[in-house]
Image: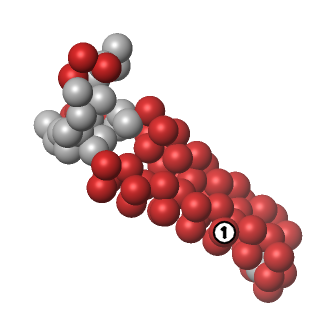
Amino acid sequence: MKKNVGKTEKTVRLLGGLAFVGASMATIAFGESLGAGRQGLIAAAMLLVAAVLLASAGAQTCPANRVLGRDTYDGDRSEDD
């Protein structure tokens, strides 16, 4: 798949993914007031968002960028698969 995530966007995705992982952990640790079911659901949703952000940063490919016609990748195109 063609790379379309550049260095700056990759960094933002990595930081955002890590922030969502931290928020998920905080929800588990301190979210008792949400109720057990809702607490787990919110934490799982945050982990899903984190996984998407971290995976797209690692692969430097984002399907949403492709649909929107965005391409911030500035590396050597010969590395693309």
Residue at the (80%, 82%) spot, across then down: 30
Q: How is the image coloured?
A: secondary structure
User: Is residue 72 shown above or below 67?
Assistant: below
Residue at the (44%, 44%) spot, across then down: 57
Residue 21: where, in percent of width, then height? Answer: 65, 61
- Where, by quadrant of the figure, is residue 71 drawn? top left
70 relative to 31 in the view: left or right: left
Residue 49: where, in percent of width, then height? Answer: 54, 53
- Where, by quadrant of the figure, is residue 32 drawn? bottom right
Evaluate whether residue 65 shows in this view.
no
Residue 40: where, in percent of width, then height? Answer: 78, 62
For disc 1, the marked residue is 22
55 relative to 3 in the view: left or right: right
Q: Quadrant of the C terminus?
A: top left
Between 43 and 41, the one nearer to me in the picture: 43
The kind of secondary structure element at disc 1 is helix
Residue lying furthest bottom: 33
Residue 27: where, in percent of width, then height? Answer: 73, 74
User: Is residue 43 shown above or below 56?
Assistant: below
- Where, by quadrant of the figure, is residue 2 drawn? top left
User: Is residue 49 shown above or below 70?
Assistant: below
Q: Quadrant of the N terminus?
A: top left
Q: Residues within 10 Å of mark 1 (few under 14, many from 20)?
A: some
The amino acid pointed to by label 1 is Gly
Evaluate whether residue 5 shows in this view.
yes
Between 22 and 49, the one nearer to me in the picture: 22
